[in-house]
Image: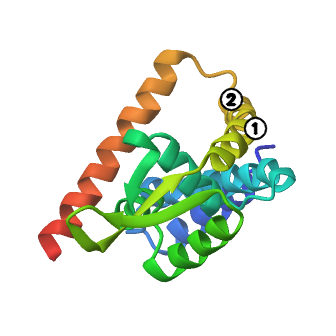
Amino acid sequence: MSCFAPTDKRLSTIKARLPGFPLEPMRLMRMSYRLQKTLRDRTIAALKPHELTDVSYMVLAVLLGSTDETASASEVGEACFEKPANLTRVCDDLQARGLIARGERPGDRRAVMLTLTAQGRALIERALPDVVAEIADAYAGFSDAELHTLAALSERQLNRLNDKAKAAA
């Protein structure tokens, strides 16, 4: 029996009670939530020995992938999908631990720039293989073509949702 079977059964019951209920989109939404939660839980467990949270890891990973390992706080917030207050708290902790440095953008003192320190780079380089192993395990058994299809469909849905949000704003 599938681990998703109980949810499927409940959704089918709702469909039987409410014939207009959009079963497949709701099924996909519940699966997406379950996948995201499961992957996040696995990532959090992989990060725990490194004394990182998922958000602090994301900040370090975003900086590692940025030009000169530096980005504005707003860019990091957007990439991490974090609200400014939480990002500030996380960055305070990372800075106190010597993993990032804060500075000003030349010519714009209002912009806070975040830079990965050598200590931060060393930590993300130690943590990354553990995260990669969890993600590789999660997608084991999928071919490259299947992974590409999953990514393309997910990107298509994200783009549509982003377009709708922009149109509503």
Task: Decide which of 46, 118 is in the foreground and name it.
Answer: 118
Task: Decide which of 142, 81 is in the foreground and name it.
Answer: 81
Task: Please name the amino acid that badge 1 sits on.
Answer: Arg
Q: Mark 2 points at which residue?
A: 136
Task: Decide which of 8, 110 is in the foreground and name it.
Answer: 110
Q: Mark 1 points at which residue?
A: 126
In percent of width and height, residue 112 lies at: 37, 69
In percent of width and height, residue 65 lies at: 46, 40
Quadrant in which the C terminus is drawn: bottom left
Q: Compared with residue 58, is residue 137 higher up or lower down, i.e. above or below?
A: above
Quadrant in which the N terminus is drawn: top right
Q: Distance between the residues labelled 1 and 2?
A: 17 Å
Q: Residue at left 26%, top 61%?
A: 106
List the single residue furthest toward the right.
49
Which of the 4 image quarters holds residue 107?
bottom left
In the image, which disc is placed on residue 22?
A: none
Q: Residue at left 65%, top 56%?
A: 99
Task: Please name the amino acid that badge 2 sits on.
Answer: Ala
